[in-house]
Image: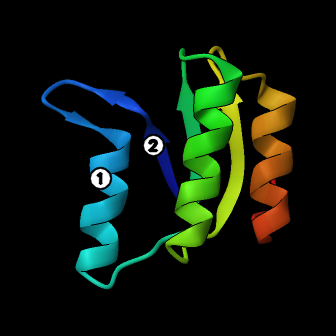
Amino acid sequence: VMVLDLELPGLDGIEVLQRLVEAHHKPPVILVSSADDVLINTVATMAQALGVTVLGAFRKPIQAAAFLQALQAYGVRR
């Protein structure tokens, strides 16, 4: 499982997703960002269209319960 912030120095999360797909490596992701919900949800939709499993898409700061729920959706137990 990859936790991916959409705002990285020198490279944004969308580019990271595109590079992973090009490399035929699509780990399930949890997207996080301080951007608005519309952008976060748009990126989540784009990632799904690329064949990436999106376990969750959250605005920072992410709540621990929401993060745990996203991990449990993938089968990670506490």
State the residue in front, 26 or 66. Answer: 26
State the residue in front, 11 or 30. Answer: 11
Residue tagged by mark 2?
4
State the residue in front, 38 or 62. Answer: 38
Which amino acid type corresponds to the residue marked 2 in the rendered image? Leu
Q: Estimate the x, y position of residue 9 in percent, counting from the top left.
A: 19, 24
In this rendering, position of residue 26 left or right of residue 18:
right
Q: Estimate the x, y position of residue 66 in percent, counting from the top left.
A: 83, 35
Above or below: residue 67 compared with residue 52: above
Circle 1: is it few (<14), some (14-19), or many (20+) Cα within 10 Å?
Answer: some
In this rendering, position of residue 69 left or right of residue 26:
right
Q: Secondary structure at mark 2?
A: strand
Q: Estimate the x, y position of residue 4 in percent, counting from the top left.
A: 45, 43
Q: Residue at 65% across / 60% down in the picture?
A: 54
Q: Quadrant of residue 43?
A: top right
Residue 32 — which label?
none
Q: Estimate the x, y position of residue 18 in percent, counting from the top left.
A: 31, 62
Q: Quadrant of the N terminus?
A: bottom right
Residue tagged by mark 1?
16
Mark 1 or 2, nearer chain start: 2
Q: Secondary structure at mark 1?
A: helix
Q: Quadrant of residue 12?
A: top left
Which amino acid type corresponds to the residue marked 1 in the rendered image? Val
* Nearest to viewer (mark 1 / mark 2): 1
Which residue is outermost to the bottom? 24
Q: Residue at 55% across / 77% down in the picture?
A: 51
- CA gap, disc 1 to disc 2? 9 Å
In this rendering, position of residue 72 left or right of residue 50:
right
